[in-house]
Amino acid sequence: MVNLIWVFMAAGGIIFAMFNGTMTDVNEALFQTADDAVMLSISLMSVMIFWLGLMKIAEKAGLLDMLSRLFRPLIKRLFPDIPAEHPAMGYILSNISANLFGLGNAATPMGIKAMEEMKKLQPGSDEASRSMITFLAINTSSVTLIPTTVIAIRMKYESVAPTEIVATTIVATLISTLGAVLVDRFFYTLRERRAK
């Protein structure tokens, strides 16, 4: 559906430009934005490589394990139907730790593995489990403490203070994650009451 919307918007813009006599502007914008996209991707790659390297060092130094131990009691309360030593718990903790550092790309494979492990806990069922829904709600609430990608974009476009968004990002993360957990719990409780 999203692809169709994009095709409709692009085709609509080109057709409008044909009748409006501004095809030259469209061509210029196409090549300019393509060039900007390539340059932005290359500059983001350097930042991503830097942060992924730091994450690897943090992992080797035991920082991620420490974070996992720190968040384990909270995660156990959020996902009460997952056994404490189940592999899904480790993937969930790694996913959230990576997201906290703004490493969305590094967090995605761990999130997929967490979903696969949670799926194994309910074989034969096509429905998402309570834990899967909670995990999705938390992930879509944008759990981030250090928005590395946004900082990289601000640095690319010569922001005076590229890191000044960190404090607001932390506040936004707290509000959005708390909101996601509350909405998840509300609908879970509602569904349980209806089932009785």
Image (tube, rainbow, N blue to C red):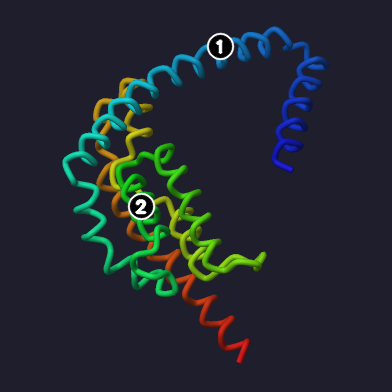
What amino acid type is highlighted by mark number 2? Ile
Write down the residue under mark 1.
32
Which is more foreground, mark 2 or mark 1? 2
For residue 75, what is the image quadrant? bottom left
Name the quadrant of the N terminus: top right
Q: Earlier in the sequence, mark 2 or mark 1?
A: 1
Q: Is 178 on the left or on the right of 120, as rendered?
A: left
Which residue lies at the image location 31% right of the left edge and 49% below the top edge? 97
Where does the image place residue 41, in percent across and percent down from the top left? 45, 21
Query: Is residue 169 something one can see in this rendering?
Result: no
Q: Dot 2 corresponds to which residue?
A: 96
Identified at 38% across, 60% down, the residue is 89
* Nearest the eye: 57 or 23: 57
Measuring from the top left, give residue 179's x and y in whole percent. 42, 65
Which of the two residues, 174 or 157, is positioned nearer the viewer here?
174
Q: Is residue 38 above or below residue 150?
A: above
Name above or below for residue 85 compared with residue 12.
Answer: below
Please give the count of numbered marks on the rendered protein.
2
How far is disc 2 from disc 1 in space, using C-alphas? 37 Å
